[in-house]
Amino acid sequence: MRYRVYVGPRGSEAISPLQKDQYLFKEFASLDDAFGWARHINGSGRVTLAIDGDDGTSFGKHEIAAALQHSESLGGSQIH
């Protein structure tokens, strides 16, 4: 299974499926690793725009931010 994490500069708007080929992405073998990278990206002055998996999993910019915020409020460092 592969998960692609799409990245853009801070202030970027959510992207449509047709725009994804215009953005940088990094692939991961697990969803936990993908969210770990998203946490790193969001903490480094950039923003995670989407996470898409080969299994049909799809998270948008706002869903990712909410999941990361929820995880931090629980005191955890991983999304399960």
Image (cartoon, helix red, strand yellow):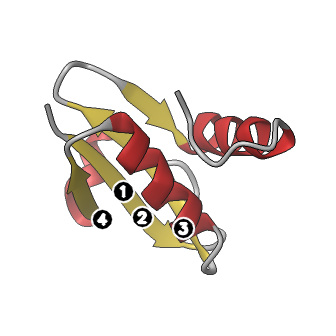
Residue 3 figure quarter: top left
Q: CA distance from mark 3 to mark 4?
A: 17 Å
Please say whether residue 12 is visible from this viewpoint.
no
Q: CA distance from mark 3 to mark 2?
A: 11 Å
Q: CA distance from mark 1 to mark 3?
A: 13 Å
Tag 1 and tag 4, C-beta contact below 8 Å = yes
Q: Is residue 39 left or right of residue 21?
A: right
Kind of residue at badge 2: Val
In the rendered image, the quadrant that contains the N terminus is top left
Label 4: state its secondary structure: loop
The location of residue 71, given as percent across then percent down, is 72, 38
Q: Reading the chain from its start, which is encountered first: label 3 or label 4?
A: 4
Q: CA distance from mark 2 to mark 4?
A: 7 Å
Residue hosting label 3:
40
Tag 3 and tag 2, C-beta contact below 8 Å = no
Q: Which residue appears at 56% of the width and 35% of the height?
A: 79
Residue hosting label 4:
23
Q: Nearer the viewer, mark 2 or mark 4?
A: 2
Q: Is residue 29 left or right of residue 80?
A: left
The location of residue 59, given as percent across then percent down, is 47, 32
Residue hosting label 2:
7
Q: Reading the chain from its start, which is encountered first: label 3 or label 2?
A: 2
Tag 2 and tag 4, C-beta contact below 8 Å = yes
Q: Is residue 65 left or right of residue 41?
A: right
The location of residue 65, given as percent across then percent down, is 67, 45
Q: Reading the chain from its start, which is encountered first: label 2 or label 4?
A: 2
The location of residue 80, given as percent across then percent down, is 52, 27
Give residue 56's mark. Answer: none
Give residue 6's mark. Answer: 1
